[in-house]
Image (cartoon, rainbow, N blue to C red):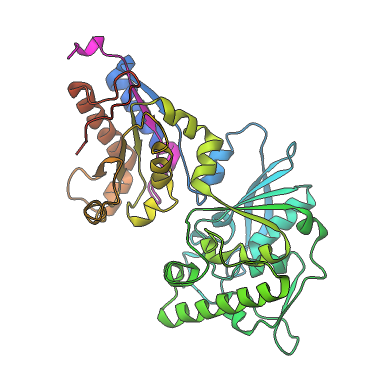
Amino acid sequence: MPALEEQPALRVLLAFDSFKGSMTATEACRASATLLAERFGERVEVTSKPLADGGEGSLELLQAQDQVAAVTVQAVDAIGRPRSVEYLLDDTRRIAYIEVAEVVGLPAVSNVELRSLAASSYGAGLVVADALNRGAERLMIFLGGSATSDGGSGILEALGARLLDASGQSLGRGGGALVDLAEVDATRLLPSALAAEWVFVADVKAPLLGPTGAAQRYSPQKGAGPDQVAHLERALDHASALLERRTGRNLRARAGGGAAGGMQLFPAAFCSVEVVAGGLLLAAETGASSALENVDVVFTGEGRFDAQSLDGKVVGTLLEMAQLLPNRPPIVVIAGDTRAAAHLRSSGRLEGIAGVFGIAESAAELSELQADAAGLLARHVAELVSVMLLTGSRRSGGASGTAARIG
């Protein structure tokens, strides 16, 4: 093996998601890059590409683009309380970037009891209306982290539609009310909403209905007990069937249709809607997808690593992209909670992942780990890089061989 100083620089890609409650994706990458530079200097070539999956943190990454500007607007949270929120607007390309978590997300209602049946996407619709009034023609709506399960019915209401029961009365807001939906009066929908191109950026591939859908898998995270889960499933099933009969559109078959409580459902019945994978879109927007082609190892991770991490989240997106490359770089995951890793490995789900590591160095309280999350993460990355340098565990000059397994 050549002396350390004779080896070509180890090419490292840092592509972390946020560690919710501890650090942003940018902070995670910055801390690791700083320590690698201090410890290894020119022996390591670092590329930092903080990532998100279409949920919280997406706007932070896009805001680095020069052509976008932050716009502040008055809206309401998922239970109707007024709040001031921001979205991004690209005046040149007439694109608005709206993060659902910023408007009707779980963080905004964390100080009250969650109301799974009544939570509404109406506030997100107010933001959409503002963007359309400012000339936006393309709406990029990032779906992760919502507190709602209303199929996006609130969005449509905010844009002028009326949701009516069998007696012609307006429904209450929230997914629970949709069991009584008899008609949607769309005659007063904003013409600009009908003309706009809607792109819902999903952080999961979940369908609208069923065991992995909006109600059964995700509404318990939003405060729904078993009875509320069943109620929301019936409501979304009823509403989607009614909309399909009215419009002739197939609304229930979209991959990602269950993201954010099925938020694409009602807009898709009347507008031009596309659902795209958030991880892939943001990887392309930030340049992470091209950076992946020219590195020896990828470090990624998030607060909790589990089966969902492989289903449209950042880790799964990187794995999916890497598997398409002729010179596939190994992917190393470092996360706050890795308890699911053993099961995932035994079931064969971790093929292509070189190792999964917990962020904790020893037993500690959650508050302690959160306080030093960036330092813990950076030290783990540096130790693993040190092992790779010492053992020559890398792809050789970009050749097709893969790095030795780590961990």
The quarter of the image holding the N terminus is: top left
View extreme (bottom): residue:
167
Q: Is residue 259 above or below residue 141?
A: below
**Count of numbered marks:** 0
Query: Observer-nearest residue: 372 or 198?
Result: 198
Residue 346: x and y, percent?
A: 21, 54
Q: Is residue 152 magenta?
A: no
Q: Is residue 247 above or below residue 44?
A: below
Residue 399: x and y, percent?
A: 33, 22
Query: Observer-nearest residue: 209 or 159?
Result: 209
**In the displayed structure image, the side of residue 261 where residue 251 appears, left or right:** right
Residue drawn at point x = 40 percent, y = 51 percent: 20
Residue drawn at point x = 30 percent, y = 51 percent: 349
**In the displayed structure image, the side of residue 63 where residue 40 appears, left or right:** left
**In the displayed structure image, the side of residue 284 where residue 226 appears, left or right:** left
Residue 160: x and y, percent?
A: 77, 68
The quarter of the image holding the C terminus is: top left
**In the displayed structure image, the side of residue 176 where residue 169 appears, left or right:** right
Q: Is residue 363 visible?
A: yes
Q: Is residue 18 visible?
A: no
Residue 250: x and y, percent?
A: 63, 66
Residue drawn at point x = 79 percent, y = 47 percent: 135
Q: Is residue 283 above or below residue 3?
A: below
**Residues shaded magenta:** 1-27
Q: Is residue 14 magenta?
A: yes
